[in-house]
Amino acid sequence: MSHPQSILVLGAGELGMAVLRNLARLAAVKTGVSVAALLRPSALDSNDPAKQKDVAELRALAIELVPGDLNALSDASLADLFRRFDTVISCTGFVGGKGVQLKLARAALEAGIKRYFPWQFGVDYDVIGRGSAQDLFDEQLDVRDLLRAQQNTEWVIVSTGMFTSFLFEPSFGVVDFERNTVHALGSWDNAVTVTTADDIGMLTAEIVFTEPRIADEIVYVAGDTVTYGQLADGIDAMRGVKSRRVAWSVPQLMSELATQPGDSLCKYRVVFAEGAGVSWHKARTFNAQKQLAVCSMEQWMRDNLRFDASVSPQ
């Protein structure tokens, strides 16, 4: 059954674009569904070829472009902007800094929209709890408390684990191809759930339109769940070279964070090394239950990594 609805997506970065593409794809075969994207005025008027390409793509998908700066707008102004939409999906990330996620949630509730998807596309904050090394996570719990304390606006949280690409981000330090080294965060048996941005976009759109309607629920998705040992094994098999393996213990990572207390990557390493709330079995996920094909870690490596055959063990 298809319900008429208007959907607003906040942000059009890597995840926002993936969500928008998939919403537009599904909306095209449904009756009375419209999709809009909130973009900063500077992005709409940008001379950057990449931004121009995204804006052109959104227009070609018949997505309404709504100008607005989330940081500059007050709660009341955001609520006025949200009010004409049935569903708001936040794809803003943490770039706005502290306070933005709570501001968006308050505005969504003040607007009285039917359903809100907050920016929680990541780990299981309930399991991690308050006071973790990554202080931004406490605000995510504040958002959950706010949403759970009311009944007027339905909410849906999509827990995705880490973006697959981030696991291989050189600055994160888990995979260091230059030094032929794989680091385990905590231990080799620690697991991490990863999902690509494209799959998160596809699955979020499916969740939006799923019947019976999903409401007031945390939905778990996963492209893959692997231990750091399995990660190293997969890299070795693909490269045909044995990687050097170094485990970073929680005390070691805590010590590094103490010397660089403002370093966001150090904070993330500690949280993932502690191992709580950062992984779940694929069998319990929305995509497994709906039998939706997703990209595994091995498939992502085949599609995105190019290895130098001359690399030798160190």
Image (cartoon, helix red, strand yellow):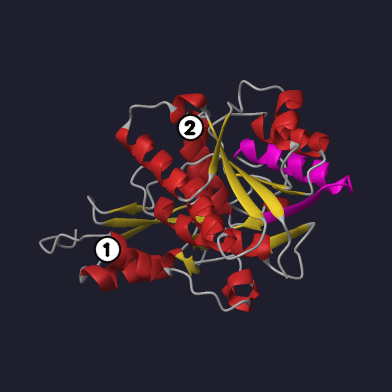
Q: Which quadrant is the N terminus positioned in?
A: bottom right
Q: Nearer the viewer, mark 2 or mark 1?
A: 2
Q: Number of numbered discs present? A: 2
**Residue 110 position within the rendered picture, expressed as x and y whole percent measured from the top left:** 82, 34
**Residue 210 position within the rendered picture, expressed as x and y whole percent measured from the top left:** 68, 67
Q: Nearer the viewer, residue 304 or 65?
A: 65
Q: Nearer the viewer, residue 179 or 150?
A: 150
Q: Which quadrant is the C terminus positioned in?
A: bottom left
In the rendered image, which residue does mark 2 sit on?
263
Report the amino acid beneath label 2: Asp
Instruction: Report if residue 24 lies within the magenta region.
Output: no
Mark seen at residue 267: none
Is residue 70 visible in the rendered image? The answer is yes
Compared to residue 185, the image places residue 26 above or below, namely below
In the rendered image, which residue does mark 1 sit on?
243
Say which element carries label 1: loop
Instruction: Report if residue 146 lies within the magenta region.
Output: yes
Mark 2 neighbour class, 10 Å CA radius: few under 14, some 14 to 19, many 20 or more: few
**Residue 148 position within the rendered picture, expressed as x and y whole percent measured from the top left:** 84, 48
What span is colored magenta in the figure?
A: 134-157
Is residue 161 visible in the rendered image? The answer is no
**Residue 277 position within the rendered picture, expressed as x and y whole percent measured from the top left:** 64, 57
Q: Residue furthest left?
A: 310
Among the 4 quarters of the image, the one containing residue 276:
bottom right
Q: Nearer the viewer, residue 34 or 126?
A: 34
* CA separation in Å, label 2 and label 1: 27 Å
Please name the residue shown 59% across and 65% down the image.
221
Q: On the picture, is 279 further left or further right than 298?
A: right
Report the amino acid beneath label 1: Ser
Say which element carries label 2: loop
